[in-house]
């Protein structure tokens, strides 16, 4: 689909209006404390067990911030570190070698 000449002329204004509306939403959210979006959490294999209490923590977080989607990934410590450094994860729960 190709915009008409008029469509091309008003496109920058339409984009600016959409960006302004998003800025208004973000400003209101900042003042009201409302969080939205997505956070990616990487867990080392086995960290989802009951001993860590991850399920309860995530449930509490969801209750406090229902507009934030949490995406979980489970893998090895090395892969989680690489994903974190590559910007593929926001947070990672990693294991460490014991001395």
Image (spheres, helix red, strand yellow):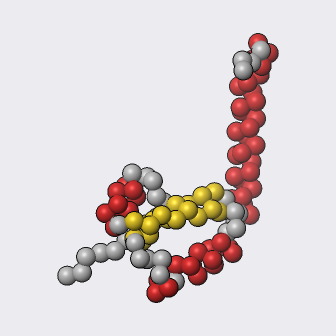
Residue 28: x and y in percent read 75, 56
Image quadrant assignment for residue 96: bottom left
In which quadrant of the rendered image does the C terminus lie? Answer: bottom left
Image quadrant assignment for residue 79: bottom left
Most distant residue in the top direction: 5
Most distant residue in the right direction: 6
Residue at point 24%, 81% (across, down): 98
Residue at point 74%, 48% (across, down): 24
Residue 76: x and y in percent read 35, 66
Residue at point 34%, 57% (across, down): 82
Q: Is residue 29 above or below residue 1?
A: below
What is the total number of numbered labels drawn onto the structure image? 0
Q: Is residue 80 left or right of residue 17?
A: left
Residue at point 67%, 59% (across, down): 36
In which quadrant of the rendered image does the N terminus lie? Answer: top right
Residue 22: x and y in percent read 71, 45
Q: Is residue 17 left or right of residue 73?
A: right
Q: Is residue 27 above or below residue 80?
A: above
- Closest to the observer: 34 or 5? 5
Q: Is residue 50 above or below residue 1?
A: below
Most distant residue in the bottom direction: 51
Residue 71: x and y in percent read 56, 62
């Amino acid at each position: 689909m190709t915009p008409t000449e008029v469509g091309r002329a008003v496109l920058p204004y339409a984009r600016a209006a959409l960006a302004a509306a998003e800025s208004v939403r973000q400003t209101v959210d900042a003042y009201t404390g409302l969080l939205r979006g997505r956070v990616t959490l990487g867990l080392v294999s086995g960290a989802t067990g009951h001993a860590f209490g991850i399920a309860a923590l995530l449930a509490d977080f969801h209750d406090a911030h229902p507009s934030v989607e949490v995406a979980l990934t489970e893998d090895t410590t090395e892969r989680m570190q690489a994903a974190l450094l590559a910007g593929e994860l926001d947070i990672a729960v990693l294991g460490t070698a014991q001395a």
